[in-house]
Image (cartoon, rainbow, N blue to C red):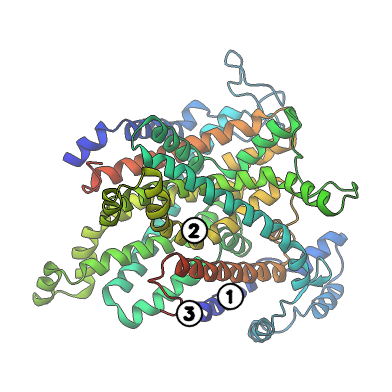
Amino acid sequence: MKALKHFLMSPAAMLGLVLLVVIVGLALFADVLYPRDPLGLAGRPLQWPNPAGRFLLGTDASGRDIAAQIAHGARTTLLMGIVSTLIAIAIGIVIGALAGFYGGLTDDVLMRLTEAFQTLPNFILLLVLVVVVGSNMTAVTIAIGVVSWPAVARLTRAEFLTLRNREFVQACRTLGLTNRWIIFREVLPNALAPIIVYGSVVMATAILLESALAFLDLSDPNIASWGNLIGQGRKVLRSEWYVSAIPGVAILLTILSVSLVGQGLNDALNPRLRNR
Amino acid sequence: MSSIPTLLILLAGLFILLQFAPGDTVDALMAQMGGGDPAQAAELRRFYGLEGSAAVRLLDYLWRLVRLDLGFSAIYNKPVATVILERLPATLMLMLSALSFAFFAGMLLGIVSAQRVNGWADTLISLLGLLFYATPSFWLGLMSIVVFSIWLAWLPPGGLYEIGSGATGIWLVLDIARHLIQPTITLALIFLAIYLRIMRASMLEVSTLDFVRTARAKGLSRGEIVRRHVLRNALLPMVTLIGLQAGTMLGGSVVIESVFSLPGIGRLAYESVVQRDLNTLLGIVFVSAVLVICVNFVVDLIYARLDPRISAGA
């Protein structure tokens, strides 16, 4: 409760939370606000943003409503961001937990693997995966999760290393609990707080990866996506720069809100830093 | 260094994965030629060594990798190694300039920030850091083109040098530098944000240590304490970060090189994805891994130099 109070007292964390709620709301109510297909023809192309007119944020070069694409794109961005973060955290926790808990050869093998993954630039690895699995939404989401886990694994391993010889773990051993029970029911809950906080960093990176991929036209072309809209706007950058500018601001605000909330959680859950 | 064997295994894994990719180079080539008959396709596959079972090709590939032969690019009609070497200088220049800019600007801002914690300068710098961290680099690049290349017409919107200017020597160097200003800054800002945060934390951490109190008790001035005692120790985590970020920066250069149409390996990676030039793509993965390993090696050397307690052998 003290942590919650601390979180609510921090203006930066609250700003992040409010922003995040707005973006999540936009994603949830995209169908209500803009029931028509966001990628369908809506009107004359390249109309400038006009709060009084039919198109709040204008139309792009193909005559599609930018505001509708922003609302539906919020759904894409959040869904892909959250799911790929969950995948990355799941892989990272399993590998980090096994390495940190068992140590020895298991640790060596798994950490070599983690290092090898960290040596390959994640965006280039993502390109390779996209070539193999194709660029529909599910495949890209999984691919982003698969390239983002190494840092989570390292963090989990470090937590497990400090916890595995604590008294409560030894007590579990004497009680005859299985290793699987000890890892997932006893040690993991104690190691989870920093991992969840780090999840905000993973999610911010995942959103950047997805939008960069969509910007390069390598993500799913059949769904509204902010990155893709920026890429479309590039062709008319010279005169109608707003087509690229607007979705970029949306990405910026989303990542800002995710990192502010993450930072707020970190300060609230980490008592050592609380008095700084 | 010890991860090199794993890396080779991983590359082999990627090679196998790429066997499952829908469509190979020959398909892309045939599409470019506007279609052709199956006999012609089989002929081309034989020519580019794409026939035979996956296992045979894997062994063949690994054997060639050991000899640093990266294969032949059907799209560019040259050995992959040649194609990559042609594109490497632009990427190296971009990475080196972005890394130095992010490192030194992050270091300076971090130091300023740590001098007066929670003062107005600290708050402003932290705010900037948050904004830089949240900005997608490719979008920032486009916006910077709009402002500095289109509206103000101060900087060129892309390319590595003015084509057809015939500049040589110092003029060519200046021309390239002018073309690299925008890509460097847009690529560097997100890393700058990370560096400044780490530097600030690290300065605060070190300045609570005993030897700093001793220095203060000796009557050294504030500036001298920071320069001669705190800085050197606070730099250690920053140097570690260079090694950790090298791969991320290479990945980031894929989009930045595409935005500013720079002829680097990042753009080459993108082109080879679009053209299904799998040999080249795999070659780029290999070369970028080697680059990251080299950066980490240099980082280890710098580390030992900054902190004599760490010897390169240990």
Distance between the alpha carbons at the discs numbered 1 and 2: 20 Å
The three-letter amino acid code for the residue at tag 1 is Leu
Which residue is found at the position 75% from the left and 68% from the top?
Answer: B85
The three-letter amino acid code for the residue at tag 3 is Ser
Distance between the alpha carbons at the discs numbered 3 and 1: 15 Å
Tell us which disc is closer to us: 3 or 1: 3
Tell us which disc is closer to us: 2 or 3: 3
Rendering quarter of residue B223 = top left
Say which quadrant the N terminus of chain A sits in: top left
Which residue is found at the position 41% from the left and 50% from the top?
Answer: B198
Look at mark 1 in the image and give the residue it sits on: B11
Which residue is found at the position 18% from the left and 72% from the top?
Answer: A165
The residue sitting at the front extreme is: B219
Look at mark 2 in the image and give the residue it sits on: A142
Question: Are the residues tagged 1 and 2 within 8 Å (C-beta)?
Answer: no
CA neighbours of label 3 inside 10 A, class few (<14), some (14 to 19), many (20+): few
Say which quadrant the C terminus of chain A sits in: top left
In the picture, measured across the screen, residue B228 lies left or right of residue B281, that is left
Q: Badge 3 sits on which subunit? A: B
The residue sitting at the top extreme is: A52
N-terminal-most mark, 3 or 1: 3
Look at mark 3 in the image and give the residue it sits on: B2
Residue B70: percent from left, percent from top = 71, 76
CA neighbours of label 2 inside 10 A, class few (<14), some (14 to 19), many (20+): many
> What element does badge 1 sit on?
helix
